Image (cartoon, grey):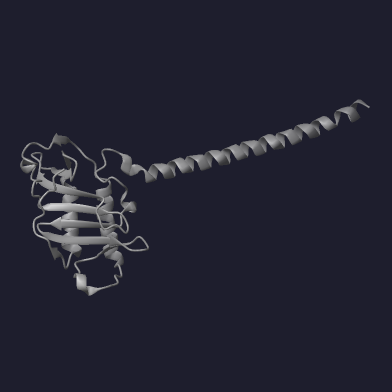
């Protein structure tokens, strides 16, 4: 009689253990999903880092232009996300199609990925001379970055002289009267890219720096 009365207890204990185990598994899955969402959000907001040069990740850009010593070189991203060199086209040419070269696209991607990692090193006031002391009043090189489908740049950077330390360059985002330094090799990379893939270019002359 005693054994018959106690026999349901182990069954209830096993059932309770099953429900506890299911609860632990559900909590673990929820924690993994939450962690993944946080990581994804962090990746998409990397441009919010105030020491990053670019305001948004390179993955959110649709085009980038480099005006180097009066020559304009334009790079765009196609529908698949592959970068290609757009070159210079006259307004009367109409619609034209580009087929990105895989090797060239990879080289462009590497150069722009490096630019996306560029960090501001030091800050300086613009000064009354409008940046002439830093070489940005009438810069030799200007970088313009665009969001996909936009005709107006998200931001423009005037690139100035090499700093006295010889490993940094002065730069300024147009409209923000603060001169910063960035690693000089970033600009060397972009100039090497232009030299390697830039065939046709538009002659735009020297670009004066827009006042804030």
Q: Residue 25, image x and y in percent?
A: 62, 39
Choose top left, top right, bottom left or bottom right for residue 204: bottom left
| 138 left or right, relative to 144 | left
Residue furthest right in the image: 1
Q: Is residue 208 above or below residue 178?
A: below
Image point (27%, 38%), residue name = 50
Give the x, y percent position of residue 47.
Answer: 31, 43
- Give x and y (percent) for residue 80: 37, 63
Q: Is residue 184 left or right of residue 6?
A: left
Number of dots carrying numbers: 0
Image quadrant where residue 203 sits: bottom left
Where does residue 74 sit, x and y in percent of width and height?
21, 61
Res 19 quadrant in image: top right
Q: Nearer the viewer, residue 163 or 17?
A: 163
The quarter of the picture where the N terminus appears is top right
Q: Is residue 110 above or below residue 202?
A: above
Task: Name the residue rendered at 30%, 70% in the picture.
Answer: 99
Quarter of the figure that contains the C terminus: top left
Residue found 25% across the figure and 73% down from its top: 94
Q: Residue at x 30, y 67 (%)?
A: 100
Of residues 84 and 17, the one nearer the viewer is 84
Q: Nearer the viewer, residue 73 or 25?
A: 73
């Amino acid at each position: 009689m005693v054994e018959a009365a106690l026999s349901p207890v182990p069954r209830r204990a096993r059932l309770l253990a099953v429900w506890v185990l299911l609860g632990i598994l559900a909590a673990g899955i929820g924690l993994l999903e939450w962690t993944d969402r946080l990581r994804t959000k962090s990746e998409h907001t990397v441009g919010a880092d105030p020491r990053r040069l670019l305001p948004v990740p390179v993955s959110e850009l649709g085009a980038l232009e480099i005006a180097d010593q009066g020559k304009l070189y334009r790079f765009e991203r196609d529908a698949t996300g592959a970068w290609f060199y757009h070159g210079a086209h006259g307004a009367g040419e109409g619609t034209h199609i580009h087929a990105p070269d895989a090797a060239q696209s990879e080289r462009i991607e590497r150069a722009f990925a490096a630019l996306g990692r560029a960090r501001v090193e030091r800050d300086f006031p613009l000064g009354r001379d409008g940046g002439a002391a830093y070489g940005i009043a009438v810069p030799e090189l200007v970088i313009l970055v665009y969001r996909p489908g936009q005709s107006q740049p998200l931001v423009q950077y005037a690139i100035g002289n090499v700093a006295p330390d010889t490993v940094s360059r002065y730069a300024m985002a147009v409209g923000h009267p603060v001169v910063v330094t960035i690693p000089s090799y970033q600009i060397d990379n972009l100039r090497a890219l232009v030299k390697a893939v830039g065939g046709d270019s538009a002659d735009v002359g020297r670009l004066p720096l827009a006042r804030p």
